[in-house]
Image (tube, rainbow, N blue to C red):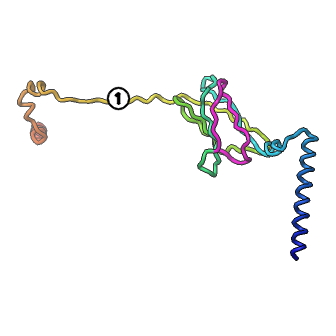
C-alpha cells in the first residue's frame, strides 16, 4: 500500500511537471510570459473625469472597492488630462468613488468587471455648494440700558399680559 501511494505521488508530480513544461513551451511559442496568463484573467477600469463644463479634472482620487467588502481595493489619482486606469482587478462587482476637494463626490455602484476586459467609467463632478457660517454675537451695552425710560424698562411679562387684557376690554 505504501508502494502504491509513492507511485501515485510520483505520477502526479511527473504529470504536473510535464504540464508546466508544456504550458511554458506553448506560451513561449506565442511570445507570452507567465505573468501574461494571470493578467488576461483579470479585468480593469479606466476613464476620464471632468467637471460640468467638460474641463478635465486632474488630481481626482478614484477608489475602487468590492461591493461585498467595506475595504478599499485600489486607489489612483487622475493625471493632467483627467484620465485614470486601474488594471489587474479580479472579475466581479465593484463600487467606484471619485473625490476632489471643492467638488461633490461621485459614486458609481454595481460596476461589473468581466474577465480580460477594461471597463470605461467616466465621471462628471459638480462644484460643491458654498458653505458659509455667520456667527452673530450680541453684547449688552450698559449705557443704553440707562437711557431707556423707566416705564418701559419696568414692564414685565405679567404687566404686559395685564395691559393686553385691559386694552381688549375697552
- Residue 128: x and y, percent? 51, 30
Nearer to me, 146 or 36: 36
Whether residue 28 appears in magenta in the rendering, the answer is no
Identify the residue at image location x=13%, y=25%: 144
Q: Residues within 10 Å of mark 1 (few under 14, many from 20)?
A: few
Identify the residue at image location x=75%, y=38%: 118
Whether residue 90 appears in magenta in the rendering, the answer is yes
Determine which residue is flagged by label 1: 134
The outermost residue toward the left is 150
**Left or right: where does residue 88 sit relative to residue 157?**
right
Identify the residue at image location x=61%, y=39%: 97
- Residue 28: x and y, percent? 91, 41
Nearer to me, 163 or 121: 121
Identify the residue at image location x=64%, y=48%: 67
* Magenta span: 73-94
- Residue 163: x and y, percent? 10, 38
- Residue 69: x and y, percent? 62, 51
**Left or right: where does residue 167 sit relative to residue 63?**
left
Quadrant occupied by the C terminus: top left
Please tell me whether residue 51 is drawn above or below residue 24 in the rendered image: above
Report the magenta stretch's main SS.
strand
Quadrant occupied by the N terminus: bottom right
SS label for mark 1: loop
**Left or right: where does residue 80 sit relative to residue 129?**
right
Nearer to me, 146 or 24: 24
Nearer to me, 19 or 106: 19
Please tell me how many numbered marks the rendered image carries: 1
> Quadrant of residue 80 in the image?
top right
> Quadrant of residue 104 in the image?
top right
> Quadrant of residue 105 in the image?
top right
Amino acid at each position: 500500500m505504501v508502494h502504491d501511494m509513492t507511485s501515485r505521488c510520483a505520477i502526479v508530480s511527473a504529470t504536473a511537471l510535464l504540464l508546466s513544461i508544456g504550458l511554458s513551451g506553448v506560451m513561449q511559442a506565442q511570445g507570452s510570459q507567465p505573468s501574461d496568463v494571470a493578467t488576461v484573467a483579470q479585468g480593469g477600469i479606466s476613464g476620464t473625469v471632468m467637471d460640468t463644463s467638460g474641463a478635465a479634472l486632474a488630481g481626482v482620487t478614484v477608489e475602487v472597492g468590492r461591493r461585498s467588502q467595506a475595504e478599499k481595493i485600489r486607489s489612483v489619482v487622475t493625471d493632467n488630462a483627467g484620465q485614470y486606469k486601474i488594471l489587474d482587478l479580479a472579475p466581479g462587482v465593484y463600487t467606484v468613488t471619485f473625490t476632489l476637494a471643492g467638488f461633490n463626490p461621485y459614486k458609481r455602484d454595481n460596476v461589473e468587471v468581466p474577465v480580460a476586459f477594461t471597463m470605461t467609467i467616466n465621471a462628471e463632478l459638480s462644484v460643491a455648494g458654498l458653505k458659509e457660517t455667520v456667527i452673530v454675537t450680541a453684547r449688552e451695552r450698559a449705557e443704553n440700558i440707562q437711557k431707556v425710560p423707566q416705564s418701559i424698562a419696568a414692564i414685565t411679562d405679567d404687566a404686559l399680559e395685564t395691559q393686553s387684557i385691559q386694552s381688549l376690554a375697552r
